[in-house]
Amino acid sequence: MPGPDLGTAVSSQSDIIELYTADLRGFRAAVGPLLAGWGVATPARRDAIAAGPAMFHPPDGPHASARTHELCWRTWLLDAAPAGITLCGPAYQDTPIIATNRTLRRLTGYTDAQLHGRNPRLLQGPATEAAAVTRLREAIAIWSPVTVSLTNHRADGTPYRSRLALQPLADDTGEIAHWVAVQTPVDG
């Protein structure tokens, strides 16, 4: 699958971040047209949007919280988005990967089972730039969004360049309980 052009990728990244920061009503209103614009809307996805997260049965079983369940539902709906999506738990738990979309798994060559529960730093390797990693760590430490370009590594060790946008997601109490990362490949 060829990667998206950079202009589309940048727009898609910000659109996807907005979907995760929107309330449920805003998400449901925006996701259908966005999926249609990307050419990936399906009857099953439209039905799932109408039904809402309560009707979603995740393949890995029930989640600990309603918010985690809802965010996994959003990730499932965005499975064919033009950018890789990684939903993670809180930093105090070492930011475990909770859900990924198909685009991310295709980009990295990892399966869902290989990613689930691991920290996203498993994508780092010998060519990963220290300055980019430092910016990511600093953003996580102060619960701040950040966008970096960096070299990550596929499951087979092959390096690839990507633009990664990382966004903290607050729960109902305002605590940062999740992070979403949106990753698109870039040339050079």
Image (cartoon, grey):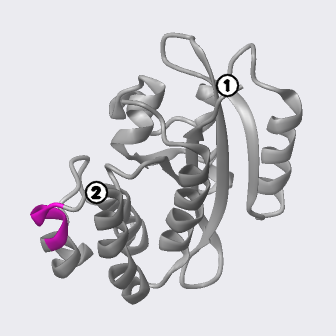
- Determine which quarter of the picture holds residue 58: bottom left
Q: Residues within 10 Å of mark 1 (few under 14, many from 20)?
A: some
Residue 127 placement (x, y as % from top left): 75, 16
Q: Residues within 10 Å of mark 2 (few under 14, many from 20)?
A: few
Instruction: Describe residue 164's horizontal placement relative to residue 171 as left or right.
Output: right
Residue placed at 47% from the left, 85% from the top?
23
Reading the chain from its start, which is encountered first: label 2 or label 1?
Answer: 2
Res 124 label = 1
Residue type, mark 1 in image: Gln
13 left or right of 53 in image? right
Specify the quadrant that holds the C terminus. top right
Total numbered labels placed on residues in the image: 2
- Measuring 82% from the left and 37% from the top, which residue is drawn there? 132
**Residue 142 coordinates in the image, percent (x, y):** 83, 62
Judge whether 173 appears above or below 41 on screen. Answer: below
State the residue in front, 11 or 133: 11
Q: Are marks 2 and 1 in contact (CB under 8 Å)?
A: no
| Magenta-colored span | 42-46
Type of amino acid under label 2: Gly
One can see residue 179 in this view: no
Q: Main secondary structure of the magenta part?
A: helix
Q: Nearer the viewer, mark 2 or mark 1?
A: 2
Q: Secondary structure at mark 2?
A: loop
Residue 92 image offset from top left, x and y in percent = 68, 53
- Work out whether 97 lies above or below 172: above
Mark carried by residue 39: 2
Question: Left or right: where does residue 91 sit relative to residue 75?
Answer: right
- Residue at point 37% right, 46% down? 101
As rendered, which of 74 and 140 lies closer to the eye?
74
What is the distance, in whole Å, between disc 2 and disc 1 at their CAs?
A: 31 Å
Q: Give the residue displayed 28% in from the left and 57% down from the top.
A: 39
